[in-house]
């Protein structure tokens, strides 16, 4: 069985039921379609909306809180499989879905999906924005199978032979960050670097 929900239905509205199912290790694949906001109902802030982003419910100063790390929350349930993916890396997403299908228990895949109207950028930039999210460490691609952590696709390549691009490059291409402050930019950069280092250290220890 497969369940698909957005970030609002996963991070906020549905987290109680999802957590209960995960605690019981119900046999299904859960896919979170994350475009960092309640886009179907007017782009209200969700638990996945980032600090500083303008939304329907944070229209002036932007959101004042950092986003939840939903994949980490789900990993804490001791699931057999947790993975992050990105619509701009379809082969990586395909491989993770196939891997999840071969397993039993609760399997969670968090898919990062840029939203042109909600994030205020041209539709033609959708793939490049998705790739830049990975290249800046905003979205880190990895999988955790039976407790074993592995970075994948673009994130794995950067970890081996590259370095992250500044988060500023990612947010500068989106109108939703039109009112972001320099302090918030620095906080977002620190947030991305902290998560990236944690993933690097974890991958190195496997």
Image (tube, rainbow, N blue to C red):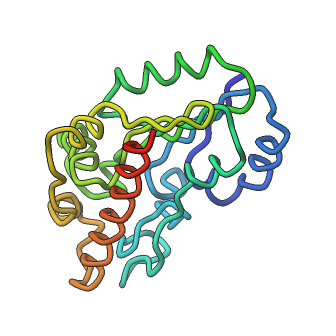
Q: Residue 25, located in which quarter of the rendered image?
A: top right
Q: Residue at x 21, y 83 (%)?
A: 182
Q: Residue 132: percent from the left, percent from the top? A: 21, 47
Q: Closest to the observer: 201 or 143?
A: 201
Q: Residue 22: percent from the left, percent from the top? A: 76, 42
How many discs appear?
0
Q: Residue 187: percent from the left, percent from the top? A: 32, 77
Report the quarter where the N terminus lies.
Answer: top right
Task: Please say if 128 is above or below 146.
Answer: below
Task: Please say if 94 is above or below 10.
Answer: above
Task: Please say if 133 is above or below 86.
Answer: below
Q: Closest to the observer: 205 or 84?
A: 205
Q: Residue at x 44, y 19 (%)?
A: 95
Q: Residue at x 40, y 57 (%)?
A: 198
Q: Residue 88, located in which quarter of the rendered image?
A: top left
Q: Closest to the observer: 110 or 23?
A: 23
Q: Closest to the observer: 3 or 104?
A: 104
Report the quarter where the C terminus lies.
Answer: top left
Q: Residue 176: percent from the left, percent from the top? A: 30, 66
Q: Residue at x 42, y 26 (%)?
A: 93
Q: Is residue 122 left or right of residue 108?
A: left
């Amino acid at each position: 069985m497969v369940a698909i929900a957005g970030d609002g239905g996963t991070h906020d509205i549905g987290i109680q039921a999802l957590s209960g199912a995960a605690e019981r290790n119900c046999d299904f694949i859960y896919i979170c379609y994350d475009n960092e906001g309640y886009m179907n109902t007017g782009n209200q802030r969700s638990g996945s909306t980032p600090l500083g982003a303008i939304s329907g419910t944070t229209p002036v100063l932007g959101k004042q809180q950092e986003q939840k790390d939903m994949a980490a929350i789900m990993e804490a349930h001791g699931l057999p499989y947790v993975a992050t993916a990105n619509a701009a890396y379809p082969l990586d997403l395909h491989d993770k879905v196939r891997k999840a299908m071969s397993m039993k228990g609760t399997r969670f895949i968090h898919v990062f999906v840029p939203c042109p109207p909600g994030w205020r950028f041209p539709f033609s930039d959708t793939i490049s924005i998705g790739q830049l999210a990975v290249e800046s460490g905003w979205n880190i691609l990895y999988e955790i199978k039976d407790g074993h952590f592995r970075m994948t696709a673009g994130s794995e390549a950067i970890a081996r032979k590259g370095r992250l691009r500044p988060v500023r490059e990612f947010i500068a291409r989106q109108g939703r960050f039109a009112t972001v402050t320099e302090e918030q930019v620095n906080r977002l950069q620190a947030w991305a670097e902290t998560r990236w280092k944690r993933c690097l250290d974890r991958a190195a220890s496997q």
